[in-house]
Image (cartoon, rainbow, N blue to C red):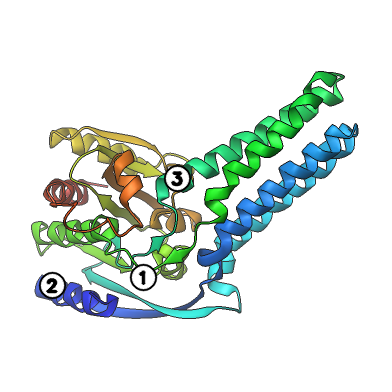
Amino acid sequence: MPEGAARRICRIELERLGFACREIDFDYSQWPGLWGPQVAAGAQLVTILIVATMARNGDPVTALALGGVLFAALMVVSRMMRRSGILGLPFLRSRGTDLEASRGQPSIWLVAHLDTKSQTVPMLYRIASALALNLLTLAAFVAVLLQVAGNQGVRSYWLLMSLAAGMAALPSLLCMVRNDSPGAVDNGSGVAAVLLAARQIPRERALGVLITSAEELGLAGARAWAETAPAESALVNCDTVDDSGVWLCMHTGAKPELSTRAATTARGLGLKLRTRRLIPCILADSIAFSDRGLEAVTISRGSLSTLARIHTRRDNTTALTGSGIADAAALLAALTMEPG
């Protein structure tokens, strides 16, 4: 179903529930979402290779200094791209539309992204690639420090480390964005859970619902909305609810009070919910809200098989019955009703 048609269905349902709805257009650059991960992986690989080559040739001090500068520059540029490049870069510009729905003066918002995408490499392997690159980067700096301290035995491992880095980077370098995934679990399940939760919350209760676009391209819709969001807003993002797996409440930065409330609420519903930092290398709209200083968490349910399926053609209703959506909706509704 085209995204515009799905948004209209969401709007009709929310207006039926007494929400005042408006569609908010925003402009953004697709470049970070389309090419950022490959460029970052390539830059990290080059940094490891430079350090390895210089250290193997007997110049560990320069390797350490140059590697540190390159890695720091990569971190700074990556942060800038996440914070401002997605909305500000002048090329590969596109337009998206968020759906904002509110009743009263909401202090808490339920969020789900409407867009979907596919990738040439399943997310599970891309995450493994990124984690392996991070570990090898750490190993390279530990090894060069040992060599600077006089341990010359590590020189024999630099070639092996270079080969391992090349293999680790390959899945990330080959991961291209496409549009072949039906998006049943990521994130049709999240949208359905949010709409079902909105049905369960009394009409007199102030509530906001945000259906974002371009989440799969750098969280663009969430970043655009967060720029003008009230500072006291708390946001519960629902992203990927599989039929089985572990219930998670994830956050970035310092653990928010909303995360503790979610765990307490889940126990009251008989759900085993784990609270933790967001899984490395996974993007969720709550990151964009947290980056703007807003309290935000992401509720999800899944397993390793879920990560292997999403962003592929196998993310369809054949593989998803939706049995977890009712539980997710109940959790969202109960959390919204908890005093903040």
Q: Are marks 1 and 3 in contact (CB under 8 Å)?
A: no
- Give the residue pinned by disc 3: 125
Where does the image place residue 269, in percent across and percent down from the top left? 13, 37
Q: Is residue 132 left or right of residue 242?
A: right
Q: How crowded is mark 2: few (under 14 residues within 10 Å), some or many (20 or more)?
A: some
Please, is residue 316 above or below residue 147 in the view? below
Depth check, mark 1 against mark 3: the one in front is 3
Left or right of 120 on screen, residue 336: left
Cα gap from disc 2 to disc 1, whole angstroms: 18 Å
Q: Which residue is drawn at 65% across and 53% down?
A: 42
Q: What residue type is labelled 3?
A: Tyr
**Mark 3 or 2 closer to N-term?**
2
Instruction: Give the residue at x 45% y 45%.
Output: 125
Q: Is residue 78 above or below residue 143?
A: below
Q: Mark 2 points at which residue?
A: 13
At a point 37% along the width and 51% down the height, the residue shown is: 296
335 vs 224, nearest the viewer? 224
Q: Residue at x 26, y 77 (%)?
A: 2
**1 or 3: tag closer to the N-terminus:** 3
Query: What is the quadrant of residue 4 in the picture?
Result: bottom left
Residue 96 occupies which quadrant of the picture? bottom left
Q: Which of labels 2 and 1 is toward the front?
A: 1
Identified by mark 1, the residue type is Ser
Q: How many labels does the image show?
A: 3
On the image, numbered disc 1 is attached to which residue? 213
Amino acid type at mark 2: Glu
Q: Closer to the camera: disc 3 or disc 2?
A: 3
- Percent position of residue 126, x then y: 47, 48
- Which SS class for mark 2? helix
